[in-house]
């Protein structure tokens, strides 16, 4: 897939930086509506030092955070939200379906299903090789 936004361009939209920027690129984007991001999971990730040293598994909360970062790009790319911050407001119906390990490429898909002034809800799905690893409904508040 073609890269629409690389990591430098993503950092112009959201405030996250290493080691907490969990999206390598955006490959599909409809401002305010949906996006697909990519996270290439490597054995060099800082969190594998402790999760788990004997069997590297990406923490589920970081998969959800990666999905939220893609959601933030969707909302903050809109002209009226540029320069603002998207804060997590809630996580509902979160399910983990498979482990994410070094060598996996996470496809981070989010579609905004509810939106008003400074609030949004997105349906989020993380996949590896087309198979669902995590799904959740994420809520966001837009602040300045």
Image (cartoon, rainbow, N blue to C red):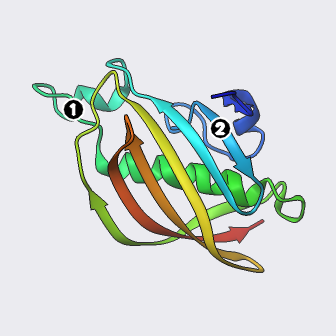
**Residue appearing at x 72%, y 47% in the figure:** 29
- Which residue is at the far left? 54
- Which residue is at the far bottom? 116
Q: CA distance from mark 1 to mark 2?
A: 28 Å
Quarter holding the N terminus is top right
**Residue appearing at x 60%, y 62% in the figure:** 111
According to the picture, the residue beneath numbered tag 1 turns out to be: 50
In the image, residue 142 lies at what x, y percent?
Answer: 70, 69
For the residue pair 116 and 84, the one nearer the viewer reads as 116
- Camera-nearest label, 1 or 2: 2
User: Residue 13 has which mark?
Assistant: none
For the residue pair 112 and 75, the one nearer the viewer reads as 112
Measured along the vertical axis of the image, is residue 46 above or below residue 27? above
Residue 93 horizontal side relative to residue 69, left or right: left
For mark 2, give the secondary structure.
strand
Residue 144 horizontal side relative to residue 124, left or right: right
Q: Residues within 10 Å of mark 1 (few under 14, many from 20)?
A: few
The answer to whether mark 1 and mark 2 are in CB contact below 8 A is no
For the residue pair 15 and 23, the one nearer the viewer reads as 23
Could you say which quadrant of the image residue 46 lies in? Answer: top left
According to the picture, the residue beneath numbered tag 2 turns out to be: 26
In the image, residue 30 lies at what x, y percent?
Answer: 75, 54
Residue 53 horizontal side relative to residue 143, left or right: left
């Amino acid at each position: 897939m073609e890269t629409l936004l690389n990591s430098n361009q993503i950092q112009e939209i959201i405030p996250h930086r290493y080691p907490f920027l969990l999206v390598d690129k955006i490959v599909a984007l409809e401002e305010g509506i949906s996006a697909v991001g990519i996270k290439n999971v490597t054995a060099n990730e800082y969190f594998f030092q402790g999760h788990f040293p004997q069997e590297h598994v990406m923490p589920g909360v970081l998969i959800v955070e990666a999905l939220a970062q893609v959601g933030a790009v969707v909302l903050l790319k809109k002209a009226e939200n540029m320069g603002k911050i998207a804060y997590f407001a809630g996580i509902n119906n979160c399910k983990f379906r498979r482990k994410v390990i070094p060598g996996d490429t996470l496809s981070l898909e989010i579609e905004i299903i509810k939106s008003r002034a400074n609030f949004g809800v997105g349906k989020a799905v993380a996949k590896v090789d087309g198979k669902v690893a995590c799904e959740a409904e994420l809520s966001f508040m837009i602040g300045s």
